[in-house]
Image (cartoon, rainbow, N blue to C red):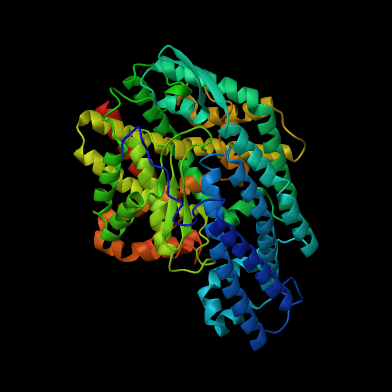
Amino acid sequence: MTENKLPHWDMSVVYPSLESKEFQAGFQSAANKIDELAKLFDQYSIAKRDAAPLDDATVGIFESVVNAVNATIVHVQTLIVYINSFVTTDTRDTVAQAKLSEFQMHLVRLNQLGVRLSAWIGSLDVDALIAKSAVARDHAYFLRKAKIEAEHLMSPAEEELAAELQLTGSVAWNKLHSDVSSQLLVTFELDGKSESLPMSAIRNLAYDPNRDVRRRAYEAEIATWAGAAVPIAAAMNGIKGATNILSKRRKWGSPLDAAVFDNSIDRATLDAMMMAAREAFPDFRRYLRAKARALGLPVLAWYDLFAPLGNGGRTWTYDEGAQFIVEQFGTFSDKLSGMAARAFRENWIDAEPRLGKVDGAFCMSLRKDESRVLTNFKPVFGGVSTIAHELGHAYHNVNLAQRTMLQRETPMTLAETASIFCETIVTQAALKKADKQEQIVILENSLQNSCQVVVDISSRFIFEQSVFEKRMQRALSVDEFNELILRAQRETYGDGLDPEKLHPYMWAMKPHYYSSTFYNYPYMFGLLFGLGLYARYQSDPAKFKAGYDELLSSTGLGDAAELATRFEIDTRSPAFWRSSFDVIRRDVDRFDSLV
């Protein structure tokens, strides 16, 4: 494998192709499983009902239903990940898009059954059920969370209608954003040759050592987003407007309250973390000013955020990165190293940037202990650390494999735990082996990432809060979205960036706004929680290793605060978050000194 021939993931181990008879049989089998589950729900009247004493018959029904739900989700997950593996690597694939749309109709029915299950659980004495049933004890956290969720459900008819309208509402708007953004072509002159490049390739030029190339790429990117902004703004207005309406109907104080519940934290935890983040903004601005000095600039422009320092450090080919990751994961455990080696050997990773492929990186749990990782690899250390990060998610999935599907429902706040930890292992190892210039490059990559996850995430959080508030009154224009994101960027980046050279279309570029609600602060939680765990690993490796895999396997069995106590962490205390920021501050000090 070479840098010019980056791997595509292998999905043939599941089905030969989307048009194969094996896939058609799998598709029909998954649809049949949902049909059978619906019949079971109807047979036992699984829906909202008046509270009644818990008898043995109800306990038996509960156990039958939960076992059937778990079995159904197993089939559905593999199929939807298989289809998505084609959609995300080429949004122009009309066959994949058609299969996705067709199966989403079945997913609506499965979601409706999930709502019915929560409503039914809301009518049960959950504590008595847990006392009587081993299956209930195994799913105690799911039950208690469903009990609370039931309090925020609309009437059965309204919930059923909301699920059906989702396909032509938020799902359709999300698809519009994905299709439009992934297929944008940008006319750009590079090395004297004008060509049309996909947006992902243009955004990769933010890492170019030539400032003029970065500036022109930034300007071309902004101009292209401006040309596509009207339909994307419509998507944003549609999704956020619907979320406001549903949150109010479900009696949540705000969309943020619903998101906090979904992410298994509370407002005390969120407020403590965000307070510590605001306190750390000056340290990140100090890092940005140090980078500006290293580049010989009075202040960084937005297009300098990802600029390489000096010669940009060594070039990392994909193969070199893979070998380094496997070796360094081995310093923690053979299990972690073996999983990474298997991922590279079995082609779990799609690494090549190309037209139609979605930007960024993510990991999907395919089946049992097997995952698939998407990344747009760059031959620098940042490209290597991104793979390490995503393989951390894959390792998390390995440890969750022993759990039932309902036990595996990990909130985003805890979903970043293993990824940050694995990324930190690789980064710290690279620093130990590096000369001064390479240390600067690696530190800068780490601080660059932390700055994105804390400062930029804070700007996105502030922006989304503002959008939800203003969307209560009316739809917003492109110019209003631009102004809201610029105001949030000025508030967070401060004097670390040139206020006249920010990015007014980050709201159009980031897919997270269109797929979820407040898909931002959980990343910060994950970074800081992961750093806190790494500090405990360093202080007592043996004790940490003894409990780490079990923690990962339990992330669907309790809320974040409860699970954090296993490592003596109080997530509701600003002190813990400040201690994680102290790790970043030490890196800022070291970076400042080196440059």
Picture layout, residue 408 above or below residue 189: below
| Image quadrant in which the N terminus is located | top left
At a point 69% along the width and 28% down the height, the residue shown is: 230
Give the side of residue 329 with respect to residue 236, left or right.
left
Asked which quadrant contains residue 51, the reply is: bottom right
Q: Is residue 573 shown to the viewer in this render?
A: no
Q: Position of residue 380 (x, y in %)?
A: 33, 33
Compare residues 205 and 501 and report the one nearer the observer: 205
At a point 56% along the width and 54% down the height, the residue shown is: 80
Q: Position of residue 57 (x, y in %)?
A: 66, 86
Q: Is residue 476 shown to the viewer in this render?
A: yes
At a point 41% along the width and 54% down the height, the residue shown is: 394
Give the side of residue 211 with respect to residue 233, left or right.
left
Picture layout, residue 502 above or below residue 157: above
At a point 44% along the width and 28% down the height, the residue shown is: 204
Compare residues 365 and 278 and report the one nearer the observer: 365
Asked which quadrant contains residue 509, the reply is: top right
Compare residues 503 and 216 and report the one nearer the observer: 216
